[in-house]
Amino acid sequence: MDFNKYLKQLRNRRGMTQRELATAANISGAEISRLESGFRQKPSPVVLKSLALALDVPYSELMRIAGYTEDKTDKPIIAAHIPDMVDLSEEELEEVRKFIDYIKHRRK
């Protein structure tokens, strides 16, 4: 998945506007817009760290999606907690992530 689409998906899942994400990540709203539109293809690791904290996702996941690493560390981390997940496809893992987001959102 392209980083711009992934970022927008994460933001939307959390019910945040671009402005809210910009504030939470201490990044300009214009930068969030550039990232989501694909104008900025590869944000800096510093920006990715801020986004990871604001969106409550692993930094390593954003680094991978942005193309800095090829290590799919999110799958082994999840699989370490739920061994049956080792054989899941990327689409199935995304469904699991969505369900986890749903559960987190429900408790707020």
Image: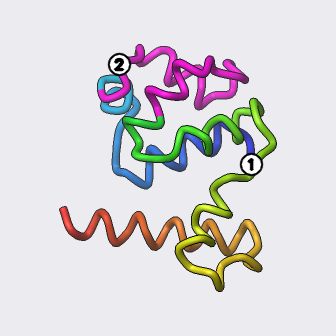
Q: Position of residue 23 (x, y in %)?
A: 30, 23
Point 53% across, 18% down: residue: 46
Q: Which mark is residue 45?
A: none
In this figure, which residue is indicated by the disc labeled 2? 26
> In the image, what residue occupies the spot 50% across and 67% down?
98
Q: Residue furthest right?
A: 70
Residue type indicated by callout 2: Asn
Mark 1, residue position: 1
Determine if the magenta segment contains residue 27. yes
Tell me the SS state at disc 2: loop
Q: Is residue 37 above or below residue 7?
A: above
Q: Quadrant of residue 13?
A: bottom left
> Which residue corresponds to the image point at 60% horizontal and 25% vertical from the top-left?
35
Disc 1, SS: loop
Which of disc 2 and disc 1 is earlier in sequence?
1
Q: Amino acid at mark 1?
A: Met
Kindly indicate the quadrant of the structure image that contains residue 96: bottom right
Q: Classify mark 1: residues with Cα within 10 Å, few (<14), some (14-19) or many (20+).
A: few
Relative placement, left or right, of 106 versus 7 is left
Nearer-the-camera pick, 49 or 28: 49
Q: How many marks?
A: 2
Image x and y of residue 39, in percent: 69, 19
Residue 87: name its quadrant.
bottom right
Q: Which residues are magenta?
A: 24-51
Horizontal and vertical percent position of residue 70:
81, 42
Residue depicted at 34% across the width and 42% down the height: 16
Tell me the CA gap for discs 1 and 2: 25 Å
Vertical comparison of 70 with 98: above or below: above
> Is 101 contained in the magenta span?
no
Other residues around mark 2 within 10 Å, as few (<14) / some (14–19) / many (≥20): few
